[in-house]
Image (cartoon, rainbow, N blue to C red):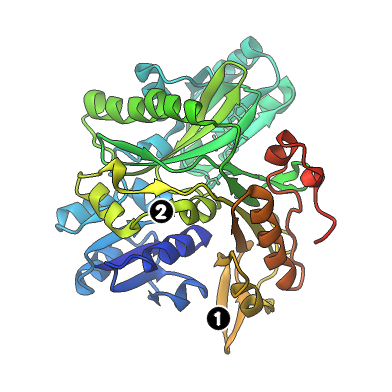
Amino acid sequence: MRILVVGGGGREHALVWKLAQSPTVTDIIAAPGNAGIAELARCLPVAADDVEGLVRLASEESCDLTVIGPEIPLTMGIANRFADEGLAVFGPSKSAARLEGSKWFAKKLMLRAGIPTARAWATTSRDEALSHVRELGAPVVIKADGLAAGKGVMIAASEDEALAAIDAVLTEGRFGAAGSRVLVEEYLEGEEASILAFTDGRRIASLVPSQDHKRARDGDRGPNTGGMGAYAPAPVVDKRMLADIECDVLTAAVRTLAEEYGTEYRGVLYAGLMITDDGPKVLEFNCRFGDPETQVVLPLLDGDLAELMMSVATGELDPSSFRVTDESAACVVMASGGYPGAYEKGKPISGLAVAGVMEGVVVFHAGTAGSNGATVTAGGRVLGITGIGPTLPDALDRAYAGVTAISFDGAHYRTDIAHRALEKAGNTKAGGRDDV
Ligand code: AMP
Ligand code: GLY
């Protein structure tokens, strides 16, 4: 099989890494890829949102399957364009991708399907939004309806903060078209978890539950980021809860999309959940793999990813065609100094070769580029160092051993990845490590 992978972050490096292990894969092309992906695939400079350019590339290169990493091309309808051309694609259609593209669409579907989620209202009126804020009381969550690069969710601690957030969305237009409508949502308390599942629109096969770390600094402090690390399995979701989530959330969403909206969802469906005292409730759906969750869930997948993705694309998913291993994985993101704010690029990275041969360590590149034979930083999240081992502490030791071998000017990372799982297990390193 010749495969095209669209995107160029840590998630796409993990996808390419796993696809490269498949005996049926002969060739991988990435568009645009990054310096790490370039070691496993031919990288071509076509942007991830250049839908027509990607359709042309897949036909010219006779690709058997194209895997879409990021959400933007999916919400633009790239899967429909591939289908029009008779090209196989892994990723949902434009109408199915509305689950991520419009938070209000997702909320309405959840209400119709009886999927547990926070109460919410959507409006284009500032006054109406404010009256819902008063009704719910603070803390309250204000969300821009559309895609806002992960920045469209604001947790307001007071009514004044809520009003400022509503103005940012509706009046100041800070989120562009994504902010033509605002959601006022009930604040949920609990622990978060990410469930990623393959689905061909009828059957569901979930990967191991994982947990992301969105805040920049240890102790879940500092600004929100795209994700500073992840681990799997996340013990907050046990086997029984996972079975319930598969049935009450994932199957319910896919079935409702098919029956009520006439749309078959094919690809990976990501449910971002809050595990509350009343059970799991959906915070958001994503129509793609998570980043950095992918860097921990794919190493625990025992099966042929290329065949699995092809079976999803052709509507023939067999959930028994893969299993998840009983190992653990942890990923520590090394970010540029200043991220998620302004940062400099072009810093040389050292130690990649040393970390790359450590047992149970995989170095996934995110924002990197090649420059005169060296690898330099080229983005906010630079690398994701994944450790894999028989237990979570082993996986973490390996990930952090990899991190300490690598350096670049200004690098920062969290030292407390998986602290919630470690706290549950009574582990003394839960508050952060002093060996890194
Ligand atoms: P989302 O993009 O919808 O996942 O929101 C980003 C982050 O905001 C989530 O990972 C949560 O940490 C937080 N969040 C979103 N919705 C809520 C909610 N209803 N209650 C509490 N936290 C929330
Ligand atoms: N890690 C969060 C996301 O991929 O949306």
Can I make out residue 317 in this image? yes
Q: Pick the quarter of the image with the N terminus.
A: bottom left
As displayed, is residue 158 above or below residue 287? above
Marking on residue 302:
2
Are dots 1 and 2 in contact, CB under 8 Å?
A: no
Q: Residue at x 56, y 36 (%)?
A: 193
The x and y percentages for residue 322 are 35, 48
Q: Which residue is mark 1?
A: 370
Front residue (pair 379, 421): 421
Tell whether 290 sits left or right of 355. Answer: left
Q: Residues within 10 Å of mark 1 (few under 14, many from 20)?
A: some
- Does residue 225 appear anywhere in the picture? no
Residue drawn where x is 49% and y is 25% of the image? 124
Disc on the earlier residue, 1 or 2: 2
Q: Position of residue 95 (x, y in %)?
A: 29, 38
Which is closer to the viewer, label 1 or label 2?
A: 2
Residue 296 vertical placement versus 154 (above, below) = below
Q: Is residue 416 above or below residue 165?
A: below
Helix, strand or loop at label 1? It is strand
Inspect the image, locate mark 1, and give the three-letter code of the amino acid beneath it: Gly
358 relative to 220, above or below? below
Callout 2 amino acid: Asp
Tell me the number on the disc at residue 185: none
Q: CA distance from mark 1 to mark 2?
A: 32 Å
For the point 43% across and 52% down, the residue is 301
Q: Quadrant of residue 100?
A: top left
